[in-house]
């Protein structure tokens, strides 16, 4: 398992509670992520032991696109 904590600013780590929204949008693109954390700002990746580099690359691409796209505003709105 690998987890990523989402914060608004790396120098002052204020939790960015959008993990559930990112997870929901990722599922729509065929990627299952586990949202969690005390502040709703952690995404957990649970790949199988036989995961390939191409699959990891696709996973990272989906998450990067979600966090870097115009959908980011929608993520904050969905996170409430």
Image (cartoon, rainbow, N blue to C red):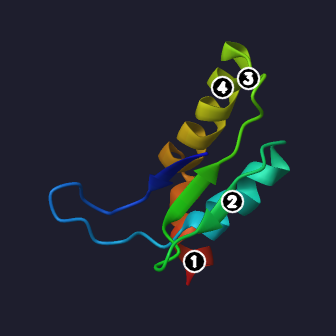
Mark 1 or 3, closer to the camera: 3
The residue where tag 2 is placed is 34
Label 2 to label 3: alpha-carbon separation: 17 Å
Q: x, y (%) of residue 57?
A: 63, 22
Label 2 to label 4: alpha-carbon separation: 16 Å
Label 1 to label 3: alpha-carbon separation: 27 Å
The residue where tag 4 is placed is 56
Give above or below for 57 relative to 76: above
Q: x, y (%) of residue 43?
A: 57, 57
What secondary structure is marked by label 2?
strand
Label 2 to label 1: alpha-carbon separation: 15 Å
Near-viewer residue (73 or 17):
17
The residue where tag 1 is placed is 79
The residue where tag 3 is placed is 55
What secondary structure is marked by label 1?
helix
Q: Left or right: 34 with respect to 39?
A: right
Q: Quadrant of the N terminus?
A: top right
């Amino acid at each position: 398992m690998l987890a990523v904590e989402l914060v608004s600013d790396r120098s002052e780590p204020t939790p960015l509670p959008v993990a559930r929204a990112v997870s929901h949008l990722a599922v729509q693109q065929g990627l299952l992520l586990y949202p969690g954390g005390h502040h709703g700002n952690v995404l957990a990746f649970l790949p199988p032991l036989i995961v390939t580099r191409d699959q990891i690359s696709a996973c990272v691409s989906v998450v990067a696109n979600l966090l870097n796209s115009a959908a980011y505003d929608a993520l904050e709105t969905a996170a409430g």
